[in-house]
Image (cartoon, grey):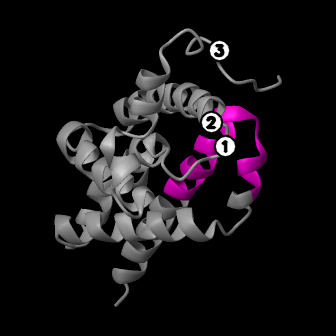
């Protein structure tokens, strides 16, 4: 199966497409937009995903990732730039993936705020440095390349968070 850029966003007005992809003024006006998009994503997680279990989080995140692929890819076309820094919907929608199974981490005794701050920091680390082959995912076509590297960074952050919690139990 060949991945292609979803085209259903094509008829939408540019202002709407770019506004959604940049989270409005968050991506367009603030310094370090990826960090602000991730912070907004952490708030998104806390408000909507915190009480959910694994299956609903994965299902809702899959829908959000697909929507982000469509809007981020279309924003690339409209802005005439590959993965523009102002496009931060990708960071926003993947933040819940950083915290898959977060209650297992909390069972180690870590306060929730520590877990959320650590997950946020780990995500920014993996998103910025793109180790472990994450950088190669940016070569995927259209919005897929914009979003999939962030999915990988979020899953790497999640795995690192769980590894840290597991190691913590042996202290």
Q: Is residue 117 above or below residue 142?
A: below
Mark 1 or mark 2: whose residue is earlier in sequence: 2
Q: Are marks 3 and 1 in contact (CB under 8 Å)?
A: no
Q: Is residue 142 magenta?
A: yes
Q: Is residue 171 above or below residue 31?
A: below
Quadrant occupied by the C terminus: bottom left
Q: Secondary structure at mark 2?
A: helix
Tag 2: Cα neighbours inside 10 Å, few (<14), some, or many (≥20)?
A: many
Tag 3: Cα neighbours inside 10 Å, few (<14), some, or many (≥20)?
A: few
Image-based side of 119 in relation to 4, left or right: left
**Residue stretch in magenta:** 136-155
Q: Is residue 130 above or below residue 85?
A: below
**Predominant SS along the magenta part:** helix
Q: Residue furthest right?
A: 2
Q: Is residue 98 visible?
A: yes
Residue found at x 55% / y 58%: 153
Q: Are marks 1 and 2 in contact (CB under 8 Å)?
A: yes
Tag 1: Cα neighbours inside 10 Å, few (<14), some, or many (≥20)?
A: few
- Say which mark, if any, is on residue 76: 2
Residue 57 in which image quadrant: top left
Q: Position of residue 143 (x, y in %)?
A: 64, 34
Of the two numbered discs 3 and 1 in the rendering, the one whose residue sits closer to the viewer = 1
- Say which mark, if any, is on residue 7: 3
Gap in Å between the C-alphas at discs 3 and 1?
17 Å
- Say which mark, if any, is on residue 81: 1
Gap in Å between the C-alphas at discs 3 and 2?
13 Å
Give whichever of 68, 33 is nearer the camera.
Answer: 33
């Amino acid at each position: 199966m060949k991945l292609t850029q979803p085209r259903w966003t094509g008829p939408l007005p540019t202002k709407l497409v770019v506004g959604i992809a940049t989270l409005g003024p968050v991506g367009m006006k603030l310094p370090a937009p990826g960090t602000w998009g991730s912070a907004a994503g952490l708030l998104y997680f806390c408000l909507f995903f915190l009480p959910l279990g694994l299956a609903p989080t994965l299902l809702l995140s899959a829908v959000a990732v697909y929507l982000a692929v469509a809007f981020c890819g279309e924003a690339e076309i409209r802005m005439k730039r590959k993965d523009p820094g102002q496009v931060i919907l990708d960071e926003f929608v993947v933040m819940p993936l950083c915290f898959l199974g977060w209650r297992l981490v909390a069972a180690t005794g870590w306060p929730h705020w520590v877990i959320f701050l650590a997950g946020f920091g780990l995500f920014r680390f993996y998103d910025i440095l793109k180790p472990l082959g994450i950088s190669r995912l940016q070569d995927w076509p259209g919005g897929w390349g914009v979003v999939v590297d962030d999915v990988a960074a979020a899953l790497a952050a999640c795995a690192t968070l769980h590894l840290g919690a597991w190691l913590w139990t042996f202290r």
